[in-house]
């Protein structure tokens, strides 16, 4: 297995009559789901550890907000380099290097109080730097995962495949509050980072050993599976008639002059803002604002991510069905608008509900509806450009995580001055705007034509 560009591909070889297609494409999707789950364990563990770190080092709520946002800043700023690297050198090698990078730094998070660096930039500065660098590493994850989907899954199942790897958000988010809380209560907060980092390093080896950039490079993919993948997936061709090489630089001017690109980017800012409240503040919101115990916060803090495990694949299925029924433009738009509108309504209702369990149910539904819509953003990147989907996905995800960077800080500021209800109301407004902005997105366009 190598990461060199695939040779010119003029269609899959003829399959033997009656041959059953292998299912390696779904093995790849499962591995991508694990990649996503791992990223969310490593980005959320600090939000759980935040309670213990605040108590141990007497950090203020605003200081904790800046520490939580440091990851998102690195993650947002390095989206485009991470996506470009995947388009230029192939997602297999780039994902391997990225997983090793962020896993090693996750492990180092537990060592922050003992690092010599704290004597130069202080304890807060060291936390900020380490979390920023974790974000730098994780920036390559989703754009390159999406590029894998672009080449491994045909058009008809694109939304479903994207929703499967996004389901990793639900898996990682469900496991993190429960397991990390138990680890920290038993062995202390640093141990949670040691364990998370070690798991990532092991998985990087598994990924590099099994995955290939394209299905035609994988020794276990048979001709029948290749025909199935490529039945509705045509390679972009150069003027000479040969397949366009995977190492071409993205057409940045064309991407940035297109209205759909900007519609995706601005609307994904609105998708990322409310989500990062769940990723960073939800556990502390349950403990500080709603008076739950640490154990209760760990259990109920997993509830939004349980809904993601249900709603993300449902959204992918719905998106593909809507495309089959109404076409890409209306089908993708309908799915995104429906999910974001429902999310905004549930977020508002949850913010104004006094009963804790009902509030958690409503807020969990809000996140589930958000992720119902999310796979459509990623599928649309592949609809618009197959060969440069990592770069387009990276630009879109950069804006989503600019929203994510703003969210923990602004939420803390609003909650401190006006209260948590107002902070969540503002998030609901941003969510609704994210759905409205889909009127500017046309998934029927081909940015490589």
Image (spheres, rainbow, N blue to C red):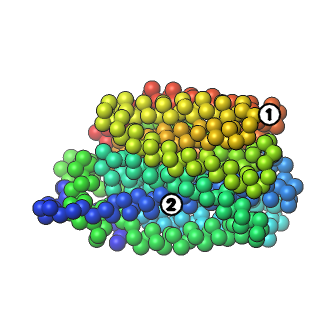
Q: Is residue 331 visible?
A: yes
Residue 341 x, y percent position in the rendering: 54, 29
Q: Is residue 428 above or below residue 249?
A: above
At horizontal 45% and vertical 26% (from top left) the residue drawn is 439
**Residue 70 can be seen in this image:** no
Q: Is residue 318 above or below residue 437?
A: below
Q: Residue at x 64, y 58 (%)?
A: 176
* In the depicted structure, whether residue 83 falls above or below residue 420: below
Marks 2 & 1, CB-CB < 8 Å contact: no
Give coordinates of residue 126: x percent, y percent: 76, 61
At x 52%, y 50%, the residue is: 309
The Cα atoms of the two marked residues, 2 and 1, are separated by 36 Å
* Residue bearing the label numbered 2: 35
- Measured as percent of width and height from the top left, residue 428 is found at 63, 31
The image quadrant of residue 181 is bottom right
Quarter containing the C terminus: top left
Q: Nearer the viewer, residue 175 or 99?
A: 175
Read off the residue under disc 1.
Answer: 419
**Residue 142 in the figure: left or right of residue 74:** left
Q: Earlier in the sequence, mark 2 or mark 1?
A: 2
Seen as rendered, the residue at the extreme right is 58
Q: Secondary structure at mark 1?
A: loop
Task: Decide which of 172, 230 is in the foreground and name it.
Answer: 172
The picture places residue 346, in percent across and down from the top left corner, at 61, 33
Callout 1 crowding tier (Cα within 10 Å): few <14, some 14–19, many ≥20: some
Q: Residue at x 45, y 59 (%)?
A: 32
Quadrant that contains the N terminus: bottom left
Q: Quadrant of residue 183?
A: bottom right
Compared across the picture, whether 290 is left or right of 163 comes to: right
In the image, which disc is placed on residue 70? Answer: none
């Amino acid at each position: 297995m190598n990461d060199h560009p695939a040779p010119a591909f003029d269609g899959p070889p003829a399959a033997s009559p009656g041959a059953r297609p292998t299912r390696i494409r779904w093995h790849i999707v499962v591995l991508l789901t694990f990649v996503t789950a791992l990223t969310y364990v490593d980005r959320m563990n600090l939000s759980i550890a935040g309670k213990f770190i605040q108590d141990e080092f007497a950090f203020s709520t605003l200081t904790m907000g800046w520490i939580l946002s440091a990851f998102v800043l690195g993650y947002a700023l390095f989206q485009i380099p991470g996506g470009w690297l995947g388009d230029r050198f192939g997602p297999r090698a780039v994902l391997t290097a990225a997983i090793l990078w962020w896993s090693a730094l996750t492990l180092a998070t537990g060592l922050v109080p003992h690092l010599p660096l704290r004597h130069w930039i202080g304890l807060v500065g060291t936390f900020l730097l380490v979390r920023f660098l974790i974000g730098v590493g994780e920036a390559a994850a989703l754009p390159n995962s999406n590029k894998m989907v672009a080449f491994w899954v045909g058009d008809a199942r694109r939304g479903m495949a994207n929703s499967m790897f996004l389901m990793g958000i639900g898996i990682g988010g469900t496991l993190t509050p429960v397991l990390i809380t138990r680890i920290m209560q038993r062995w202390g907060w640093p141990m949670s980072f040691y364990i998370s980092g070690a798991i990532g390093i092991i998985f990087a080896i598994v990924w590099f050993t099994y995955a290939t950039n394209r299905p035609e490079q994988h020794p276990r993919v048979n001709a029948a599976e290749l025909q199935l993948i490529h039945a509705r997936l045509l390679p972009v061709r150069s003027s000479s008639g040969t397949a366009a090489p995977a190492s071409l630089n993205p057409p940045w001017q064309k991407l940035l002059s297109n209205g759909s690109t900007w519609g995706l980017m601005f609307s994904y800012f609105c998708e990322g803002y409310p989500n990062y409240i769940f990723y960073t503040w939800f556990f502390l919101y349950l403990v500080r604002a709603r008076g739950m115990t640490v154990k209760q916060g760990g259990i109920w803090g997993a509830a939004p991510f349980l809904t993601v495990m249900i709603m993300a694949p449902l959204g992918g299925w719905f998106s593909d069905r809507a495309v089959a029924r109404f076409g890409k433009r209306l089908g993708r738009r309908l799915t995104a608008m429906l999910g974001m509108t429902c999310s905004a309504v549930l977020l508002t209702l949850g913010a104004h509900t006094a009963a804790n369990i009902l509030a958690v149910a409503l807020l969990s539904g809000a996140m589930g509806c958000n992720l119902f819509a999310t796979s459509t953003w990623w599928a649309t990147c592949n609809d618009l450009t197959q060969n440069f989907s990592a770069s387009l996905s990276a630009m879109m995800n950069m804006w989503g995580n600019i929203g994510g960077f703003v969210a923990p800080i602004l939420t803390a500021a609003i909650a401190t001055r006006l209260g948590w209800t107002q902070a969540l109301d503002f998030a609901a407004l941003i969510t609704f705007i994210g759905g409205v902005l889909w009127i500017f997105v046309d998934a029927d366009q081909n940015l490589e034509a």
